């Protein structure tokens, strides 16, 4: 038996190809939207992976340091380091800001990393060019997505940093590339006031008789020094010893230090389940709408193609063609349209993904699910046309 | 009674019920022998198409008896379970317009019927080519229907009607879109094929050009048929 669907498609291949391309672009957008969501999740996981930490110690009752602000003293790490099971503890600060690059701004996450050596928690785990930060001030390692190159100078607040190393795929949970600078510089940058504000603050302090006592020389200087320095960090990153579980190490920190501690699973839940949950729902809504629009388009196209063949279908039924042969013809055409659309969509998404400003991750499982969804949509969309075709009276082929 | 060809006795068809009922066919009797071509003539609304649809097993007669090729197919109710198979195997259709399947070439348009009946593709195409040769359109065997002239399309449609060697051919205004020469050519072909394959042919027509070619004619008016002898003129 010849394939009626195949012959019809070959006969009207232009119509099928162009319709398939149109549908494919829609499917491409759908796959890309799914890729955007996957990219957001992956950005969050990469952020956690690259921090090198097993535990995140943050201000009590906050979801810091990524989902909420968190501020803890910068000397806490010493006492945390002494607790059983802690292999390493390192301060870290995170600050999202705009930095100038040539004539343009680029949005980055400035990470303040504690002094140490490569492999210390918070440090970029590997570089693609240059070296790690070796000086205590004014050196930076930047992600290549920032557009900076080795030797470039980065202005952060009032200070200028030289890019000495480049790294890759070091991004915040919202996809902003990272710039690593020494912790002290980062602490200063986080709370640094402008000159006028500092001047005003000093005048107010000097005018305060409680701080400016003639009988206590040095008090005023000490107060002013404390006002202009920042002794807070956003979190302490903790790496645990292999023989301990995260829960064993976290519990004494919560209990004795009265801080909040998150392990990897909890932090992932915060990033994926809370931080990007709204975006995920937004994308899910888009996916549903795109799926419905795709189904409507396929249904409309298949319905129109079938309407164009009403007389032929009546003749086919009159001369003894089984209903299932006719239904099969329509169904196969819908599926072929879906396959063409999916192939075009997949190619479109693959080529378009790198052009997006944020990371778009196209996973094989999404492609498989997308393909299955396209086939299901095509089957459902062809039902209307099949019902109509099966209702065609063979008597319509005979005049009168 | 069983007989070759077509035998219709007391066939009636009523549309609707009660006060709105319309009796489209009233006690129709008709016989067409194998190899014979008869005309069925009548004005619009006389019941021609209804009769053709009853014979073609696409609508249900209300009462009567129909025998096709020794088989009682209707006796106040259908006696054949699979009307689709009946249409495929026992009845050939030729329409006013050829209604060829536009996405199949000429050979496959004809070969489709035997394929639907389960004949292998090669054998079906062989049968199709034999008929196309008999109808002198074998040179267009690979052409698409849109590439054929009106006369060629109608000959291909006749080949499609004959390819399963049905004992009956029902032709609904087969010459309507054709000029005199092509119309007479189609009727000559139907007569040749009817004799060659022992097929009973009913031609529904208004076409004054071809009416004189029938040896027997059934007139139908208000659902009632009466038979008369035709002129049986030569096709030349």
Image: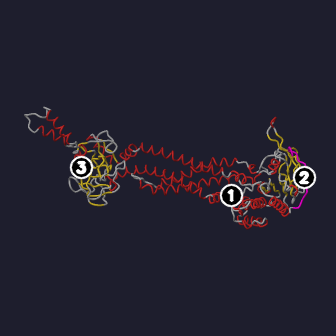
Name the mark on residue A125.
none
Asked if the stretch drawn in magenta spans residue A32, the answer is no
Residue A354: % across, % down: 41, 56
Whichever of callouts 2 and 1 sits on the residue coming sooner in the sequence is 2
Q: Mark 3 or mark 2, which is nearer to you? A: 3
Q: Quadrant of residue B107?
A: bottom right
The front one of A124 and B59 is B59
Give the numbered dot on residue B102: 1
Q: Is residue B181 above or below residue A249?
A: below
x 27%, y 54%: residue = A120
Does mark 2 fall on the same chain as mark 3?
no
- In the image, is A308 to the left or to the right of B186? left
Residue B229 within the magenta-colored segment of the rendering: yes
How far apart marks 3 and 2 lie (CA) works out to: 109 Å
Is any atom of residue A89 visible in this view? no
Residue B134 in view, yes or no? yes
Q: Which residue is mark 2?
A: B1
- Name the residue carrying label 3: A183
Q: Which chain does tag 2 point to? A: B
Please tell me which residue lies in front, B231 or B5. Answer: B231
Q: What's the distance in space between the residues labelled 2 and 1, CA to CA?
A: 42 Å
Q: Position of residue B97 (x, y in %)?
A: 75, 55
Number of residues whose C-alpha sits closer than 10 Å to that of mark 3, classed few (under 14), some (14–19) or many (20 or more) = many
Q: Please state the extent of the stretch shown in magenta in the rendering.
A: B221-234
Q: How is the image coloured?
A: secondary structure
Mark 1 and mark 3 in contact? Answer it, CB < 8 Å: no
Element on which disc 1 rests: loop
């Amino acid at each position: 038996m010849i394939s009626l669907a195949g012959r019809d498609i070959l006969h009207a291949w232009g119509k099928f190809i162009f319709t398939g391309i149109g549908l494919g672009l829609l499917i491409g957008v759908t796959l890309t939207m799914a890729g955007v969501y996957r990219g957001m999740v992956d950005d969050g996981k990469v952020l956690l992976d690259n921090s090198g930490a097993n535990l995140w110690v943050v201000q009590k009752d906050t979801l810091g340091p990524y989902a909420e602000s968190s501020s803890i003293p910068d000397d806490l790490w010493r006492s945390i380091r002494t607790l059983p099971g802690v292999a390493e503890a390192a301060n870290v600060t995170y600050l999202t800001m705009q930095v100038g690059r040539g004539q343009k701004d680029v949005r980055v996450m400035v990470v303040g990393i504690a002094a140490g050596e490569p492999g210390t928690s918070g440090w970029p785990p590997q570089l693609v060019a240059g070296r790690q930060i070796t000086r205590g001030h004014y050196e930076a390692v930047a992600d290549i997505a920032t557009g900076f190159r080795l030797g470039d100078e980065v202005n952060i607040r009032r200070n200028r940093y030289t890019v000495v190393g480049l790294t890759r795929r070091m991004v915040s949970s919202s996809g902003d590339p990272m710039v690593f600078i020494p912790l002290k510089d980062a602490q200063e940058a986080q709370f640094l006031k402008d000159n006028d504000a500092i001047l005003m603050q000093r005048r107010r302090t000097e005018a305060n008789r409680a701080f400016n006592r003639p009988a206590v020389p040095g008090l005023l200087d000490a107060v002013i020094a404390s006002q202009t320095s920042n002794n807070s960090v956003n979190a302490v990153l903790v790496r645990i010893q292999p023989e301990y579980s995260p829960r064993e190490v976290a519990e004494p920190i919560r209990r004795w230090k009265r801080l909040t501690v998150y392990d990897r699973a909890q932090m992932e839940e915060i990033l994926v389940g809370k931080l990007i949950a709204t975006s995920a729902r937004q994308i899910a809504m888009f996916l549903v709408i795109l799926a419905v629009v795709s189904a409507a388009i396929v249904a409309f196209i298949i319905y129109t193609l079938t309407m164009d063949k009403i007389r032929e279908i009546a003749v086919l039924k009159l001369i003894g063609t089984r209903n299932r042969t006719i239904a099969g013809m329509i169904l196969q055409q819908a599926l072929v349209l879906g396959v063409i659309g999916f192939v075009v969509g997949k190619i479109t998404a693959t080529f378009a993904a790198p052009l997006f400003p944020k990371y778009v991750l196209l996973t094989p499982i999404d492609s498989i699910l997308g393909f299955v969804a396209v086939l299901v949509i095509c089957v459902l969309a062809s039902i209307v046309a099949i019902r109509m075709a099966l209702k065609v009276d063979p008597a319509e082929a005979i005049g009168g | 009674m069983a007989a070759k060809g077509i035998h219709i006795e007391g066939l009636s068809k009523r549309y609707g019920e009660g006060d709105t009922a319309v009796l489209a066919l009233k006690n129709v009797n008709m016989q067409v022998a194998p190899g014979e071509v008869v005309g069925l003539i009548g004005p619009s609304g006389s019941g021609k198409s209804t009769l053709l649809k009853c014979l073609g097993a696409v609508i249900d007669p209300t009462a009567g008896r129909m025998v096709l090729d020794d088989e009682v197919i209707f006796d106040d109710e259908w006696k054949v379970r699979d009307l689709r198979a009946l249409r495929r195997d026992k009845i050939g259709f030729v329409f006013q317009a050829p209604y060829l399947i536009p996405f199949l070439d000429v050979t496959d348009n004809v070969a489709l019927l035997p394929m639907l009946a389960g004949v292998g593709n090669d054998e079906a195409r062989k049968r199709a080519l034999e008929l196309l040769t008999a109808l002198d359109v074998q040179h267009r065997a690979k052409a698409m229907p849109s590439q054929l002239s009106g006369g060629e399309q109608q000959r291909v449609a006749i080949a499609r009607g004959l390819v399963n060697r049905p004992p009956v051919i029902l032709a609904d205004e087969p010459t309507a879109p054709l000029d005199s020469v092509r119309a007479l050519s189609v009727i000559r072909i139907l007569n040749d094929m009817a004799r060659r394959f022992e097929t009973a042919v009913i031609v529904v027509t208004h076409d004054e050009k071809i009416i004189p070619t029938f040896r027997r004619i059934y007139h139908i008016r208000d659902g009632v048929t009466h038979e008369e002898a035709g002129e049986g003129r030569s096709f030349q």
